[in-house]
């Protein structure tokens, strides 16, 4: 058996699969995972990792977070106001705009543009015949978020994203008419629809920003956690990613990206560390979310970095930043814990491009 075969056999027999490098930053992220040397098991010397008696037991640790306002989807709940529109056609009048056609028909301007293959900037001309697509359209109001809209109709936000062909940065506009796909049969009351809704990381990354008015400018990111922005105030996000990504903590890689032995997919990696280890921002960005609404991940911070990139940090015991705060690469944003469904002190770390999870080992510096 060759050297590669012996390493593969060793990996299969070990419960912990990698040492995470603690070296300096690299000028650019590698395109391949860390070398085989990093896959050797090295038991932690500075911490014990107690395991829970039952993996699915209720979370034992509490999350300490900064006092803040409720998230926007709680501060500004949505009342379902979707209007059913029948399929029809419309002949453009002199002076019409696509927005005016949407107002008259009750359909969304974006949906009309897609149905008629209109390219940006969606210019229409008098006498042109437009097809009006059928559907139920929700009128977006001030402060509403994608999460709150999805909750009001008891459907996944991802279905609304797909139905409306929403793209990065997924910001809704006040006055926009959003196509609502069919609700779950048998659920008619607001309470039933709300109870059917399940929040996930993808929702927080793409559906937590409040709708912005046409004439409104988003607020600038705050410099420190001492200031609290209103929950329904849109915040300006970075347009471009600045520099390469760095590791959020030093520790042992105990969970890899992708399908696990049980078949359940892991959208990130898990890094075992001592309790209260500082968790660092992987790149410059702004805080899109800091809270604990996703029970499995406990204390959770999500950063947006520009160019569609976002990073996710879970199982924190203490959250040290708040929504709308600007952070620098390497800045401490939280402390590690065993909150949520963590079996030992660890950090759950994800990287996303838009809604899509990306393997962090292909983006972070190697050994």
Image: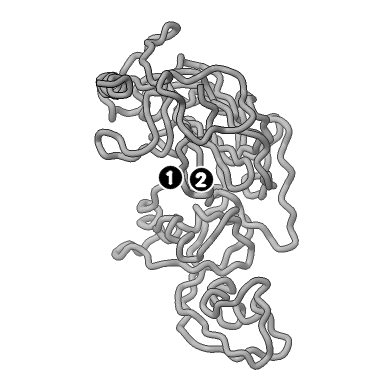
Write down the quadrant of residue 304 in the picture.
top right
| 230 in relation to 314, above or below | below
Q: Is any part of residue 52 visible from this angle?
A: no
x, y percent for residue 85: 48, 80
Which residue in the protein does label 2 denote? Answer: 204
x, y percent for residue 156: 41, 55
x, y percent for residue 38: 43, 20
* SS for callout 2: helix
The residue depicted at 47 percent of the width and 33 percent of the height is 32
Query: Foreground: 98 or 59?
Result: 98
Q: CA distance from mark 1 to mark 2?
A: 7 Å
Query: Quadrant where the N terminus lies?
Result: top left
CB contact under 8 Å: marks 1 and 2 = yes
180 vs 116, left or right, is: left
The residue depicted at 66 percent of the width and 35 percent of the height is 243
102 vs 275, left or right, is: right
329 vs 58, left or right, is: right
* SS for callout 1: loop
Write down the quadrant of residue 158 in the picture.
bottom left
Which residue in the protein does label 1 denote? Answer: 200
Name the disc covering residue 41, or none: none
The residue depicted at 63 percent of the width and 25 percent of the height is 330
The image shows a total of numbered marks equal to 2
Q: Residues within 10 Å of mark 1 (few under 14, many from 20)?
A: some
Colour setup of the view: one colour
Residue at the front extreme, as displayed: 2
The residue depicted at 40 percent of the width and 22 percent of the height is 36
Q: Is any part of residue 306 visible from this angle?
A: yes
């Amino acid at each position: 058996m060759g050297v590669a075969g012996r390493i593969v056999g060793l990996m299969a027999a070990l419960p912990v699969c990698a040492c995470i490098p603690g070296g300096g930053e690299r000028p650019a992220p590698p395109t391949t995972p860390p070398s085989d040397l990093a896959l050797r098991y090295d038991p932690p010397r500075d911490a014990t990792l107690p395991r829970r008696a039952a993996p699915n037991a209720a979370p034992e640790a509490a999350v300490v977070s900064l006092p803040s306002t409720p998230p926007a989807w709680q501060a500004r709940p949505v009342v379902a106001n979707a209007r059913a529109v029948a399929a029809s056609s419309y002949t453009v009048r002199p002076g019409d705009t696509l927005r005016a056609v949407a107002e008259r028909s009750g359909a969304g301007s974006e949906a009309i543009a897609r149905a008629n293959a209109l390219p940006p900037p969606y210019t229409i001309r008098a006498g042109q015949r437009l097809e009006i697509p059928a559907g139920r359209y929700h009128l977006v109001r001030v402060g509403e978020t994608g999460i709150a809209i999805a909750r009001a109709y008891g459907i996944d936000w991802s279905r609304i994203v797909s139905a409306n062909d929403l793209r990065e940065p997924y910001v809704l506009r006040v006055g926009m008419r959003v196509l609502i796909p069919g609700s779950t049969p048998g659920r008619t009351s607001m309470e039933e629809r709300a109870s059917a809704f399940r929040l996930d990381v993808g929702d927080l990354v793409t559906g937590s920003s409040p709708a912005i008015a046409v004439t409104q400018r988003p607020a600038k990111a705050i410099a420190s956690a001492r200031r609290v922005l209103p929950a329904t105030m849109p915040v300006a996000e970075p347009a471009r990613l600045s520099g390469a990504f760095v590791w959020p903590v030093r520790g042992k890689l105990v969970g890899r990206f992708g399908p696990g032995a049980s078949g359940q997919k892991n959208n990130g990696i898990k890094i075992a560390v001592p309790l209260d280890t500082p968790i660092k921002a992987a790149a410059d960005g702004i805080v899109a979310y800091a809270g604990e609404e996703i029970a499995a991940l406990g204390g959770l911070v999500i950063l947006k970095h520009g160019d569609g990139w976002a990073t996710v940090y879970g199982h924190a015991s203490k959250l040290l930043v708040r929504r709308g705060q600007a952070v620098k690469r390497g800045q401490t944003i939280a402390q590690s814990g065993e909150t949520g469904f963590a079996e030992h002190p660890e950090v759950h770390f994800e990287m996303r491009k838009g809604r899509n999870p990306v393997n962090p080992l292909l983006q972070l510096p190697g050994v």
